[in-house]
């Protein structure tokens, strides 16, 4: 009788332990299989922001909207307009921030229609440029651009006159990959051109000429930092 008593007590203790926790004690349970996973600490990590050097080339075209006083008659005699349409190439580079901003510069040269007054009229621009590119989460990103610059015009890369310019425009960038971009932009440029006497002897007055430009861009990015 005394040998069976310890065995019975041991059996009762085992059954009580297997039946669950004591009353008032919290019970541990596994989460449901379909419950969302929680990030350690309850906070998701911020998105990765990358900064780039962005550079490339663009095929450009310029249309003369109004030549202003540069092509106005002088002394009662009208000379052929020395400012026509132009086509050429732009080379640019700059800094693309982790946010929506691009800041850079561009050098552009184009052969301008000079009404045969120049053998090869070259119109050059050096510009400081900014772009604002809002992030819509798509590969195609519209942008607004603006800036200031300087210009030079003459025969066969010579400089016979110069001036300054402002510009503003709209465009779109399309990401081919993380580092390659195609783009298209339209830009309006009023240009102040200093007066001069051209090679045909015609006097050109100082004036503001108005141009509409179009660009087809190909640009690359090189990563410079993450935060």
Image: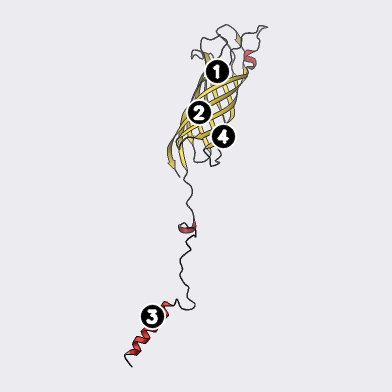
The tag on residue 61 is none
* Residue at image point 40% right, 84% down: 12
| Above or below, 159 relative to 137 | above
Q: Secondary structure at mark 4?
A: strand
Separation of marks 2 and 3 at Cα, in angstroms:
79 Å
Q: Position of residue 166 (x, y in %)?
A: 59, 26
- The mark that comes first in sequence, 2 or 3, is 3
- The residue wearing badge 2 is 217
- The residue wearing badge 3 is 14
Separation of marks 4 and 2 at Cα, in angstroms:
13 Å
Image-quadrant location for residue 150? top right
Residue closest to the far left: 3
| Mark 1 Cα shell of 10 Å, populated few (<14), some (14-19), many (≥20) | many
Q: Secondary structure at mark 3?
A: helix
Q: Position of residue 133 (x, y in %)?
A: 55, 37
* Residue at image point 33% right, 89% down: 4
The tag on residue 86 is 1
- The residue wearing badge 4 is 143
| Mark 4 Cα shell of 10 Å, populated few (<14), some (14-19), many (≥20) | many
- The mark that comes first in sequence, 3 or 1, is 3
Quarter of the image with the N terminus in it: bottom left
- The mark that comes first in sequence, 4 or 2, is 4
Residue 63 appears left or right of 107: right
């Amino acid at each position: 009788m005394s040998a069976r008593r310890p065995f019975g007590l041991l059996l009762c203790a085992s059954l009580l332990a297997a039946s669950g926790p004591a009353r008032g004690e919290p019970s541990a349970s596994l989460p449901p299989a379909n419950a969302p996973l929680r990030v350690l600490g309850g906070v998701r990590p911020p998105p990765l922001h990358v900064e780039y050097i962005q550079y490339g080339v663009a095929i450009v075209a310029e249309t003369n909207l109004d030549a202003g006083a540069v092509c106005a008659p002088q002394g009662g005699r009208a000379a052929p307009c020395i400012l026509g349409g132009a086509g050429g190439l732009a080379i640019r580079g700059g800094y693309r921030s982790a946010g929506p901003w691009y800041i850079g510069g561009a050098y552009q040269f184009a052969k301008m229609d000079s009404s045969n007054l120049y053998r090869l009229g070259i119109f050059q621009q050096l510009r400081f440029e900014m772009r604002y590119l809002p992030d819509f989460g798509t590969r195609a990103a519209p942008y607004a651009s603006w800036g200031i610059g300087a210009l030079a015009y003459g025969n066969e890369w010579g400089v016979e006159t110069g001036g300054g310019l402002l510009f503003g425009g709209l465009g779109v960038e399309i990401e081919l990959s993380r580092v390659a971009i195609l783009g298209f932009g339209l830009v309006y440029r009023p240009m102040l051109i200093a007066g001069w006497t051209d090679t045909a002897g015609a006097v050109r007055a100082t004036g503001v000429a108005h141009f509409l430009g179009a660009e087809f861009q190909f640009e690359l990015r090189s990563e410079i930092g993450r935060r």
